[in-house]
Amino acid sequence: MPVKLQGAVALRKALKQYAPDLAKETQKEIAGHLRKVTNRAKGFVPATSPLSGWANPVGEWEYRAFNASIMKKGLGYSTTPTKPNKRGFRTLAQIFNSSAPGAIYETAGRKNPMGLPAAKRTIAYRNGEYVPAFTSGRDVNSSANPYAGRQFLEALPPLIDSQKSNSPGRRTRKTKGRLLFRAWAEDQGKTTAAVVKAIESANNRVVVLTKGAGSKTFRARSAG
Amino acid sequence: MANTDLAIKIATTLDATGLNKADKAVNKFNRTVGRLGRNLGLALGTTAIIAYGKASVKAFAADEAAAKRLSTAVDNLGLSLSQSRVTSFVKDLETSSAIADDVLRPALQALLTTTGSLTKSQELLSNAIQISRASGIDLATVSEDLAKGFVGVTRGLRKYNTGLTQAELKSKSFNEILGIMLARSAGAAEEYLTTTSYKMEVLALAAGNAQETIGEGLVDALARVGGGTEASDAAKSIDNLANSTSNLIKFLGSAIGLVNKFRKSYTNFLAGGDVDNLMAGTQPSTNRSKSPAGTAARTAQQRQAEAAAAKRAQELAALTKKQVASSKALTAEQKKQTALKKAGSIFDLEQIQIIAALQGKLSKEDELRLKAQLALLNGNEVVATALTKQILMAQDQTGNLYKLFLALPDARNPFAYLEGYLDMLAGKAAALSATQMPTAATSSQGSRIIVGGTIIDLPALPTTNVQTGAFPRSNPGDFRRAEEASNMSGPIQVTVQIDGKAVASSLQDSSLSGIGSSVNRTGR
């Protein structure tokens, strides 16, 4: 769960106004902490496809096929605050996995640990007559191999949960992964603490620079 | 960064700037809406006042036009001197019945045009109001139906549930039907005066009249603003002002308050005199002469119109009576013809049926019965009696039934009295022949008869070249003898001419006409 900061926007404005260099320095400091996590995540990307067929960029799989370089490029970080969401919250720092094959490798098996169920035989009405057919859609495995999903998952490393049992916030399938979430789990909150500390340090320095003109309103707290 | 949900958010912060902006925007919007509502209310109020002003002008114009139409109709009927009476009648009726004058005027006009009599029209309009109150049908329709009924078209009176059939409506006079309608709707008009609906109508009527009065004032004032004197100029002025002036409400508010002042000063400026005096000088004429001679002329005119109307009504009544009589005669004749036709067809049918039945296979007894019935129908008494005997004997071999039939007493003869009368006539004829029977003597010169002792010479019969006995008699032997005699004395030539031509020539001419039926008729 992200750490909620109060007054971060005001701090950012103050930094830009009174200590532009400090602002840049703070951004760099935060980026340095995040880069460590993403580099660790990139280290979990395998050199070759776990199943040879996934590496074939054919048809609709042209942009989803396994490609290690694309997967590594997709792992990144950002220290630029985002636009407020509909509830008014802005993200100050984040790490992400943005490539298609990287997302597949990260999340495969989250929803169906044994793979998608195989398509079932059914009867469809086509061209004026009833013919035998198979069920289709996103919820079934349309491969001729009914065990394709399970075999694919068996070839991948296990999912790692970034949330520990004593971590604040809910533990859901959306906190599990093989690249980013694995690296975040292994980080054990050190990056979060370093980022918050960097921001707090910048705030303190702004207060010093402005000789107490601005109150020390910055406060970090973990979301409950 | 890439837009993805597959991310770990490390630090977030609440940025309420956007929310505050949204909040401010909403508040501002609310204030704007409030102002808009107030502005709209003001605008709508202005629009309503303008609309009321327009409606007032239109109402006044319509009322004025209806009054002029009625006035023209009265003039055309030769009752121009009764204009004031018509006006006062409409006004009084409007007050008493709470029916707007713009409804009463067309109704009265329709009745006036049809009847031609002011008195009759006023009476019929009062009747129409009563019938309208009772039936719930609007006054215009009732008046129109009564006007049509007055001239004999009573078809429209069916809807008033008079209880009369269509034939009765046609055969009865208008006054009879009107009497029935009035009897059925008696008291309806008086009872209506006690209802809430009547009170509401009184209020609506007052509002309508007020609107017309305001409209009159507006027309008078605004027409002058528009540079004219007609209602159309006033309406144009209102439109122009409404479109060009954003604060028309102020204008109307002040205009209504200052209209009398404005009119007075403007008229004073134009005429150079006091407006009240000018207005008093332009009072509409009542057509009432102050002199006794004027009253006499008006009364004479009215009497003349009444007489013409009465004459026309009499003619209509006579025509209706004649039509009814001819209709009845025609109906009776048709009934008679129908009865005769039916009787004839039945008789013929009976004979036809009997003859047809005799063609088929029948038992002997049935055949006898049918033959007896046919003989009775044809009046052949002898055959009928014989056949009846056969039938009765066939039914009872002992002959008792036939004896009983013979023993039945005769039916009473309805013409028995004629027997004595005929005997008396026969006796007188016998006595006359015994005393005055003329004796005749025939000679080649002529005939001579003696009647009652007087000798009368009859002229000689014309002679022919046909020998005596040449014409056939009833006896074939005579015919043969005549023919032999003719042969002895030469053939008898008889020439028949058509239009001066012999038959053969005439037929030949006809064959030349090319008509198929006439070709080769001479056999040559």
Image (tube, coloured by chain):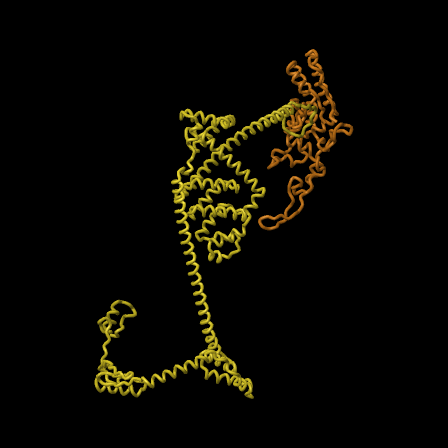
Chain colours: A orange, B yellow
> Can I make out residue B55 in this image?
no
- Nearer to us in this view, B78 or B487: B78
Q: Position of residue B70 (x, y in %)?
A: 43, 41
Q: Is residue B215 left or right of residue A39?
A: left
Residue visible at 41% across and 56% down in the picture: B318
Q: Position of residue A67 (x, y in %)?
A: 64, 31
| Quarter of image, res A172 | top right
Classify A199 as above or below B360.
above
Q: How many marks?
A: 0
- Which quadrant: the C terminus of chain B? bottom left
- Nearer to us in this view, B357 or B229: B229
Classify B27 as above or below B59.
above
| Quarter of image, res A115 | top right
- Nearer to us in this view, B329 or B458: B458
Classify B73 as above or below B467.
above
Residue with the most extreme top position: A211
- Which quadrant: the N terminus of chain B? top right
- Nearer to us in this view, A200 or A128: A200
Q: Position of residue B334 (x, y in %)?
A: 44, 65
Classify A50 as above or below B23.
below
Residue with the most extreme front position: B292
| Quarter of image, res B426 | bottom left
Residue with the most extreme right position: A166
> Can I make out residue A134 in this image?
yes
Q: Position of residue B429 (x, y in %)?
A: 36, 83
